[in-house]
Image (cartoon, rainbow, N blue to C red):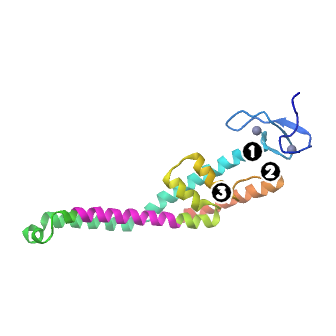
Amino acid sequence: MINVACSYPNCQNPVIGQCAGFEKSCGRYYCAVHSEDRLCFECAIEKNEALVQAEYARIAQDVTKRAARSLWKEGLLAIGVIFFVIFLGINGGDSVTNVLPFWLPLLMIVGVNFWFMLAVTKRQSQWAQDVGKDLPGFENFYAIWRKNKNKNDLMKSLQIAGGIAVVALGIGAAVQRQGAIDDLHKIRRALEKY
Ligand SMILES: [Zn+2]
Ligand SMILES: [Zn+2]
């Protein structure tokens, strides 16, 4: 016999529907408390986590781009140094090439590049840390996102960070979710300043 009861453990509430499934079929039954948008509580959690992860990934991309762009002065300086070195190499004549080994300009170009990449990486980490003050677990999420964009690893980083996973459903969850959404809006406004 099919057990027509809410899929939430030990829930005795009347069943009001069958789960449509999130990104896969489900078919579990749910009551009015343990459901959301025709999803059972488990699928609702998956959906909310996926939404949060997508939003975090979007902000991570934003932080990456904006942090790099915010270093345009340093970037110009780096390009300037590189051109100066190339200019020295071309126009230095014998007096300079006698003093400077031929590989020095090359080494400097590599060095300047390396220094700039470090500056960008450092700025990105700083910003991720700042964003993390408003968005729980973002700093950790960003560190993983920058290295690999594996969905499961990212999801784990969110779960370990806790807080952000919208676990409870019902009125409490609505408040929690609204809080998370408000936080995301706050971050986006903060990012607009840069
Ligand atoms: Zn229930
Ligand atoms: Zn379900």
In this figure, which residue is indicated by the disc labeled 1?
44
Dot placed on the residue nearer the N-terminal end, 3 or 2: 3
Q: Position of residue 164 (x, y in %)?
A: 69, 57
**Magenta residues, as a range?**
106-126
Q: Position of residue 15 (x, y in %)?
A: 89, 38
Question: SS class of the residue under badge 1?
Answer: helix
Say left or right for 174 vs 189: right
Residue in the picture at 83% in, 44% down: 8
Question: SS class of the residue under badge 2?
Answer: loop
Residue in the picture at 11% in, 68% down: 97
Who is closer to the viewer here, 74 or 156?
A: 156
- The residue under label 3 is which amino acid type? Ile
> Which residue of the protein is positioned furthest toward the left in this rendering?
94
Q: Position of residue 43 (x, y in %)?
A: 74, 42
Residue in the picture at 37% in, 68% down: 74
Main secondary structure found in the magenta portion: helix
> Which residue of the protein is positioned furthest toward the top in this rendering?
1
In this figure, which residue is indicated by the disc labeled 3?
160
Question: SS class of the residue under badge 3?
Answer: helix
- CA–CA distance in space, label 1 to label 2: 8 Å
In this figure, which residue is indicated by the disc labeled 2?
169
- CA–CA distance in space, label 3 to label 2: 20 Å
User: For the residue with label 1, is its CB less than 8 Å from the closest atom of ligand 2?
Assistant: yes
Say left or right for 54 vs 42: left
Dot placed on the residue nearer the N-terminal end, 1 or 3: 1
